[in-house]
Amino acid sequence: MSVETSNPGPHLDFRGYSSGKEPVNMSVTSDQVAAIRSAAEKYYEPMIKFAQESVRTKSLSGQEQDMAKLLKDELEKLGYDEVWIDDVGNTIGKWTGSGSGKSVQFNSHIDHVHEGDPGLWSRPPYDAVIEDDVLYGRAASDVKGGLAPQVYLLPVLKEAGLAPVGDVYITGVVLEEVGGFGAYHLCKTMPTDLAVLSEASNNEIRRGHRGRNGVQVTFTGLSVHASAPSRGHNPHYALARFLQKVETLEMKPHSTFGGSTVAPTLISTDQTSGNVTPGALTVLLDWRSIPGESHDEVKEVVYEIAKASEIEGVTATVDVIMRPVSTYTGIAAEMPPTRGYEVDADSPIVSAAVESLGTAFEKEIPTGVWQFATDGGHLNHFGIPTIGYSPCEEHFAHTIHDQVSLAKMRDSLIGHSVLALGLTAIK
Ligand SMILES: [Zn+2]
């Protein structure tokens, strides 16, 4: 644990250090943490209320308009300097920094997965019931329970008389659950120096994940009556060779993630009758890639073994599955597979986050990687070092037990306020 206790300064206002517009490279002090803690008290209730309203505002991927509006109204109400909705429907709030420090976006996706059968839920998925200090409902843990503390970092810091030295953005992005087109668009139109995602981290720090590629391999032969197989070319035998090669394929190792993995999942045929040999067979591979392993590279490896599996009269084709999406604003796009990424454990963003949060909570803050994929793959690909920090818990995401602890949200409000100071001050 690293606790910065020296040089708290005569007052707590970061603006006091910024007259020269030079980035201030200093750790968050215990006095600043004390000011944040006391200021935060006032905002616990409105933050939780906003989280409740967010859960009540259903916003499936491609239908985020009501949530985008709710977020825009909240950001305006809280005094963000500029608030707007961009072409693809992302909501953005900007708080102009007091100096020329790093720009940091606190990023939450505003879409969520479907609730499934509401009858299976113990509490209605969009009622946002609070019981025993827990908020229940779809998206509570993925990620509306993480969005609220991000949004409320501004009033807390202002109340505490503090201001980040770099620009702080709250970015509510669309379509994360279906490939991340909102974040992808933001990378190209409004890149920031750094990013913090509200994807579930249990108030710990996350610094990467593997990517996911769907690779479709089709073997095409000649379909005939199954009573006379020699007249045709049965793709089953080529597929059998191929699957054996997949099973023994040498995967790339990785020190953090263990390595990439590949698993055949679905198989389909062009026939529906049991007495006809198939003309074509398609197998889907779920390929989890390590950071830096591109989908072109994955496709090349699969292509090689698919070609080597061809038999007389049977040819192979390989496609990486792209995802067609459309925004509620009417823009259509095709998304590439999710990218894996990793920022180093000793990179400036991770070090600054560990140090700032360590000071705030007077304990060692664990760091780790996510099991699932996030928009961080896009952000990092575009050169924006990205970490995760969120009160949400991974095991509740996408389940009928979707929930977020209000105690963790309150802690996270303090954590986010501290991160806004600490990360913008990175030299
Ligand atoms: Zn999700």
Image (spheres, rainbow, N blue to C red):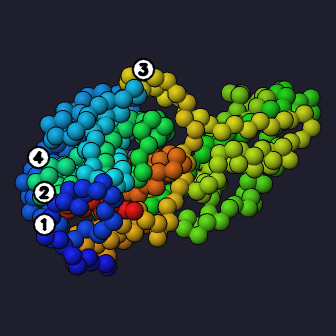
The residue to which callout 3 is attached is 330
Nearest to N terminus: mark 3 or mark 2: 2
**Cβ at disc 4 under 8 Å from ligand 1:** no
Secondary structure beneath label 4: helix
**Residue 184 versus residue 233: which sits nearer the camera?**
184
The residue lying furthest to the top in this view is 330
In this rendering, which labeled residue sits more in front, label 1 or label 2?
1
The residue to which callout 1 is attached is 11
Residue at 49% x, 24% y: name it. 332
Secondary structure beneath label 1: loop
In this rendering, which labeled residue sits more in front, label 4 or label 1?
1
Mark drawn on residue 141: none
Amino acid identity at mark 1: His
Q: Are marks 1 and 2 in contact (CB under 8 Å)?
A: yes
* Left or right of 9, for residue 315: right
Secondary structure beneath label 3: loop
The residue lying furthest to the left in this view is 42
Secondary structure beneath label 2: loop
The residue to which callout 2 is attached is 161
Amino acid identity at mark 4: Pro
Task: Measure how far apart labels 3 and 1 are at the Cα level.
Answer: 50 Å
* Left or right of 341, for residue 279: right
**Residue 128 versus residue 78: which sits nearer the camera?**
78
Amino acid identity at mark 2: Gly
Q: Quadrant of the N terminus?
A: bottom left
Nearest to N terminus: mark 4 or mark 3: 4
**Quadrant of residue 270 in the image?**
top right
Q: What x and y, as percent, mark residue 320?
A: 66, 39
**Cβ at disc 1 under 8 Å from ligand 1:** no
Mark drawn on residue 46: 4
The residue lying furthest to the front in this view is 20
Nearest to N terminus: mark 1 or mark 2: 1
